[in-house]
Image (cartoon, rainbow, N blue to C red):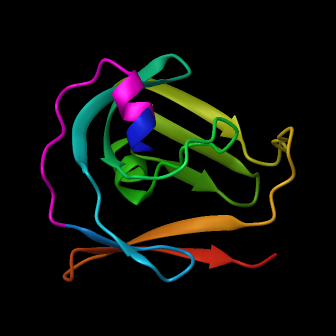
Amino acid sequence: MPYSFYKNLDLPPLQKIRMTLQMADHSITHPHGIIEDLLVKVGKIIFPVDFVVLDMKEDEELPTILGRPFLSTTRALVDIYDSMLTLHVEDEEITFEMNQKVSYDKPRDEVLRMNNMEGENLNEIEEIEN
């Protein structure tokens, strides 16, 4: 989450975190902190999500990407054949059709990916060329 976005919202104080991120341009940055267990509503279900807060340009058109820890928390089931993603919390579930295209007003020339490298406590963001 961009730091400017964090400042504009009424969110709890940031917790310090020892993390190093390598950006797509191979520069190294350190987050301002982390917000743990922030409640996020997806459809009709509310999930606790952790957000790492970075000094970066705010872009309303670029969606927030929720990674593997979120998918694990939600007991996500990914059906590649039918292009479906199902999230679960207790008795509730929500299903998304993944073959539906998402469009933005501005074309994007880049895609970013963030990997959590276990053991080294290092997160890496790499640019994927189209």
126 horizontally vs 34: left or right: right
Choose between 129 and 44: the one closer to the eye: 129
| Horizontal and vertical percent position of residue 20 | 28, 72
> Is the stretch drawn in magenta largely helix, strand or loop?
loop
| Horizontal and vertical percent position of residue 71 | 43, 50
Numbered range of the magenta stretch: 5-18
| Horizontal and vertical percent position of residue 65 | 53, 49
- x 86%, y 38%: residue: 105
Choose between 115 and 15: the one closer to the eye: 15
Q: Quadrant of the N terminus?
A: top left
Where is 59 relative to 94, above or below? Answer: below
Where is 29 relative to 100, above or below? Answer: below
Q: Quick check: can you spot residue 89?
A: no
Where is 126 relative to 14, above or below? Answer: below
120 horizontally vs 49: left or right: left
Q: How many circles with numbers are drawn on the protein?
A: 0
| Horizontal and vertical percent position of residue 69 | 34, 54
Q: Quadrant of residue 18?
A: bottom left
Q: Quadrant of residue 58?
A: top right
- x 65%, y 45%: residue: 62
Q: Quick check: can you spot residue 11?
A: yes
60 horizontally vs 27: left or right: right
Residue 17 located within the stretch drawn in magenta: yes
Choose between 9 and 74: the one closer to the eye: 9
Q: Quadrant of the C terminus?
A: bottom right
Residue 37 located within the stretch drawn in magenta: no
- x 29%, y 30%: residue: 38
